[in-house]
Image (cartoon, helix red, strand yellow):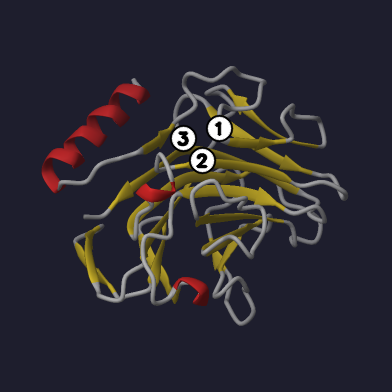
Amino acid sequence: MKKIQIILTTVLLAVLSGYSAPLTVNFENDTVGAAPKADKVSPATPADDIGIKVIDAASNKAGEGKGVSFIDNSATAGATLEYNFVPDAASQVSKFMASVNFSCISKSADGKGYIAVGTGAFDSKLNSAATRLNEVRLYSKNAMRVALDGSTTGQKDRTFNSLGAANKLVMVVNDTAEPTNYDLDGTQTLKGDSVDYWLNGKLIATVALDKEVIGTDKNFGRIGFSSNSGTVGVDFVFDDIAVTPIP
């Protein structure tokens, strides 16, 4: 049922708004207990202390049907899940909406561990802040922070729903110099070279894109989820990853 609903919704959006949806990931065709199919998943085989693996509907607190568990309790390794949403570098886009459902399953002792959710160039390695052209960090203390030019310094925490509850993150990117309109809770206007962040149906922040892409366009083609090698205490579930270009 979940898969049918997603397909119908995607088709309806395309018909009504002219949008296309080059990426829709719901894990329904992946094998429970194994790593999901992706353009990059590391480690390739999930372990008890670190890994990304497909979970069944009973364990999926982020959505319906299958999802993925993202755990990092290793002090020496990081984990990465990445997808291209364009077929090649020549097809990169300037304006798009990316969304994902997520749930924090358990908190770490200090709450400092986080997963970075970001976008960048086609085939780039998004496990580094240097290659993420925009990013938001989901902390294992039920809070998130947006990054400005690769840094969260000076950015405040935005609390999301408590342990085991579902959340929805939406990132709307405009990599052009001119404002653009998009439809989310009514018609919204996003200024040039900026990104809007929505959490659970509310606009929580608007920040500039990384300085390296300001003044250029068509820089985006990949979305990624990653923890760094020093992260310990990350336990999240993800579902329904989608990226839709804005015409």
- Specify which label sits upstream in the sequence, 1 or 3: 1
Name the spot of residue 142 as percent of width and height, x first.
Answer: 62, 57
Quarter of the picture containing the C terminus is bottom left
Question: Which amino acid type corresponds to the residue marked 3 in the rendered image?
Answer: Gly
Q: Give the class, few, some or many, for how many residues have Cα within 10 Å of label 2's Cα (few <14, many ≥20).
A: many
Of helix, strand and loop, which one carries label 2?
strand
Residue 83: numbered disc: 2
Asked if marks 1 and 2 touch (Cβ < 8 Å), the reply is yes
Residue 2 or residue 120, whichever sits in front: 120
Hey, which residue is sitting farthest bottom in the picture? 154
Question: Which amino acid type corresponds to the residue marked 2 in the rendered image?
Answer: Tyr
Residue 39 or residue 196, whichever sits in front: 39
Residue 63: numbered disc: 3
Q: Is residue 235 left or right of residue 64?
A: right
Question: Which amino acid type corresponds to the residue marked 1 in the rendered image?
Answer: Ala
Q: Residue at x 61, y 19 (%)?
A: 32
Asked if marks 1 and 3 touch (Cβ < 8 Å), the reply is no
